[in-house]
Amino acid sequence: MKLKFDNIRKSFVHVFGGSVLTENFFLRNMRFILVVVLMMFLFISHRYSVLQKMSEIERLERVLKDARYESLTISSSLTEASRQGEIERRVAAAALELKVTNEPVYHIGK
């Protein structure tokens, strides 16, 4: 048991002490290792930016949905207010002396 613990301790010191970086394998493949690390950073940053854009898209979709509902509400209230019966009721409520004509409108042409 003591022997295993000493081996683990030596390998731990070897890796984290920095002497593993001076070995021949790492020196020959340093460019490849740097490229792999750079690719990892790029993938992580790309994923982070994609997640931010997805959350922004979801937020904008909620805003669009709210705007659509508001547009429907305004459109329905405008349709209700522009009905002939509603106009006649408002004219009568305002005590205006306007009457609905029964005769068709005549257009005078040139």
Image: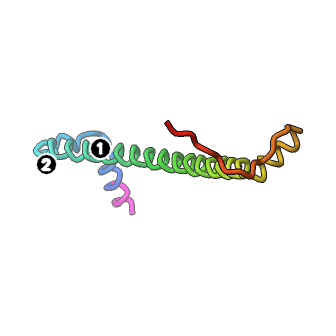
Amino acid type, callout 2: Phe
Circle 2 packing at 10 Å, graded few (<14), some (14-19), many (20+), is few
Image location (x, y in percent) of residue 39: 25, 46
Image location (x, y in percent) of residue 102: 74, 52
Q: Residue at x 67, y 50 (%)?
A: 104
Which residue reaches farthest bottom?
1
Q: Quadrant of the N terminus?
A: bottom left
Circle 1 packing at 10 Å, graded few (<14), some (14-19), many (20+), is few
Q: Is residue 17 left or right of residue 72?
A: left
Residue that mark 1 sits on: 42
Residue that mark 2 sits on: 25
Q: What kind of secondary structure does the magenta stretch mostly adopt?
A: helix
**What range is drawn magenta here?**
1-6
Tell me which numbered mark, 1 or 2, is placed earlier along the sequence: 2
Compare residues 82 and 14 and report the one nearer the observer: 82
Q: Residue at x 32, y 45 (%)?
A: 13
